[in-house]
Amino acid sequence: MNSRSSERTLAGLQTGMAGALVMLAWMAISMLWTRHSVWWFPNLMATTFGGDPALHTGFGKYSAAGLALHLLIYSGLGVVFAFLVPDRATHGRLLLSGVLLALAFYFFMYGFFWKHVNPLIPLYSPDRQLLVAHVFYGMMLSRYSRYAQSAGWARQ
């Protein structure tokens, strides 16, 4: 991998991780709003590893695995985004591309992938909150150019 690809990968990882953390913050707030535990979403993701026992109200032995799975998936999507957008894309193009990619990913993951891999996730997932979380994630992807600038190669 050349240095430009490495820098693009790292900027994508940073962007994806920042977006994933914003998603988790939104999910925690929205879960409190609907009178669920802040750990509901990470525990729901953790059912991939622990099945039904992972789905409870507090932080449990599977919660960290659910958090890690979420961060891994969305950090990886940030890398994919980094390689899809052109080097000198405008902020508006990045914003539109990021939101569209995030929404397409939402519909793929919750409409198809999770139904086959872990049916508990689409069954118990809070659809509206997740849709909004993906919009926030897509908005965070638009910050990619800032992370790429800090790597020193974009928009030079």
Image (spheres, helix red, strand yellow):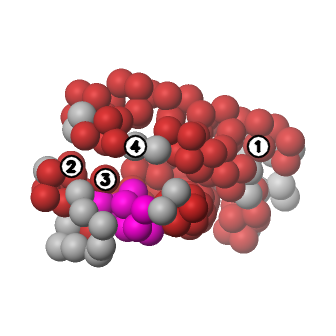
Query: Rounded to the nearest whole Å, what is the CA distance between mark 1 and mark 2?
Result: 32 Å
Query: Rounded to the nearest whole Å, what is the CA distance between mark 4 and mark 2?
Result: 13 Å
> In the rendered view, would you say 44 is above or below 118?
below
Query: Rounded to the nearest whole Å, what is the CA distance between mark 3 and mark 2?
Result: 6 Å
Range covered by the magenta-colored residues: 36-43
Query: Are the residues tagged 3 and 2 within 8 Å (C-beta)?
Result: yes
Q: Earlier in the sequence, mark 4 or mark 1?
A: 1
Q: Nearer the viewer, residue 56 or 91?
A: 56
Can you tell which mark lies on residue 45? Answer: 3
Q: Amino acid at mark 3?
A: Met
Residue 107 at what x, y percent from top left?
A: 49, 28
Q: Earlier in the sequence, mark 1 or mark 2?
A: 2
Identify the element where label 1 is drawn. helix
Q: Residues within 10 Å of mark 2 (few under 14, many from 20)?
A: many
Q: Is residue 91 left or right of residue 138?
A: right
Can you tell which mark lies on residue 94? Answer: 1
The residue beneath circle 2 is 48
